[in-house]
Image (spheres, grey):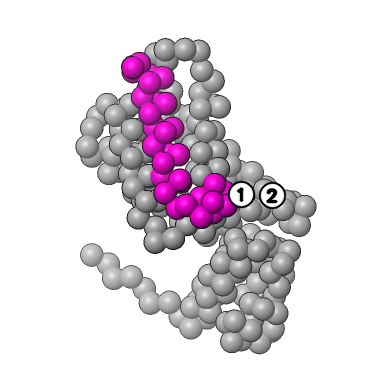
Amino acid sequence: MTALRALSKGEQTRQRLLDLAEEAVVTKGFAATSIDELIAAAGITKSGFFYHFCDKNDLAKALIVRFLERDEAIYQELSAKAANLTEDPLEEFLIFLKLLADMFQDLPNCHPGCLSATYAYQDTLFNADVRAVNVQAILAWRTRFRARLADIAKKYPPKIPIDLDGLGDMVMVVADGGIVMSKGLRQPSLLPQQVLVFRSLVRMLFQGA
């Protein structure tokens, strides 16, 4: 097994800046997050910041790309676990949703927030390149889950007519909506509960009562 390469000092600084920026952006928004506060928190100079990022939009793009890579890794991990437990497409998706709910339940506090949703709320702050990355990410969620639902529908025709694109979109809608509710009401359990409610609806849609 190949050992993980240790990060250089420069790479560590870049990751530290991204960590600080992500926490700040999710907490108070992109506009309220300044380069000066990030370099102060990281303990570097302004020239040190611009060594890693050309400008604030460059930082924004790096943030969303890292977020999406991490999101994809989580999805692949949970999907692989579900696939190892069954070959039935519906049961596999239901297991995946249960694993997702369990992951949210295990968070020590409320979910910090979805960076992609934060970018969508404040899209006028970003250049076209950053906005395009976020749009592609949202559409990737639709494509990902729409394909899974299509496989399910082949074996289990829906009990009522349903737009599979819309149903696929609901995974992101439920997750982001659950984050908003859990944060607003300070009830972390609301997020996994919403995922489990969606799971029950999927079961009823394709299997019936």
Give me the residue at 45% from left, 29% from top: 147
The reply to whether the magenta stretch includes residue 151 is no
**On the rendered structure, is 34 left or right of 93?**
right
Magenta stretch: residue 187 in it? yes
- The residue located at (54%, 51%) in the rendering is 185
User: x, y (%) of residue 149?
Assistant: 43, 26
Query: Looking at the figure, which quarter contains the N terminus?
Result: bottom left
Give the residue type at disc 2: Tyr
The residue type indicated by label 1 comes to: Ala
Total marks placed: 2
Residue 141 makes an appearance in the image: no
**3D distance between C-alphas at marks 1 and 2:** 6 Å
Q: Residues within 10 Å of mark 2 (few under 14, many from 20)?
A: few
Q: Main secondary structure of the magenta part?
A: helix
Q: In this view, which residue lies farthest toward the right?
A: 124
Residue 100 as seen in the image, left or right of residue 119: left
Image: magenta residue range: 180-209
Classify 163 as above or below 198: above
Residue 97, how many percent across, how many down? 37, 38
SS for tag 1? helix
Identify the residue shown where x is 63% and y is 77%. Answer: 38
Residue 39 lies left or right of residue 203; in this view the side is: right
Locate residue 117, reporting x and y percent: 61, 49
Disc 1 to disc 2: CB gap under 8 Å? yes
The quadrant of the picture occupied by the C terminus is top left
What's the mark number on residue 121?
2
Q: State which quadrant residue 79 falls in.
A: top left
Q: Can you say whether 176 is above or below 18 in the image?
A: above
Residue labelled with disc 1: 117
> Considering depth in this image, is 99 or 154 the residue closer to the camera?
99
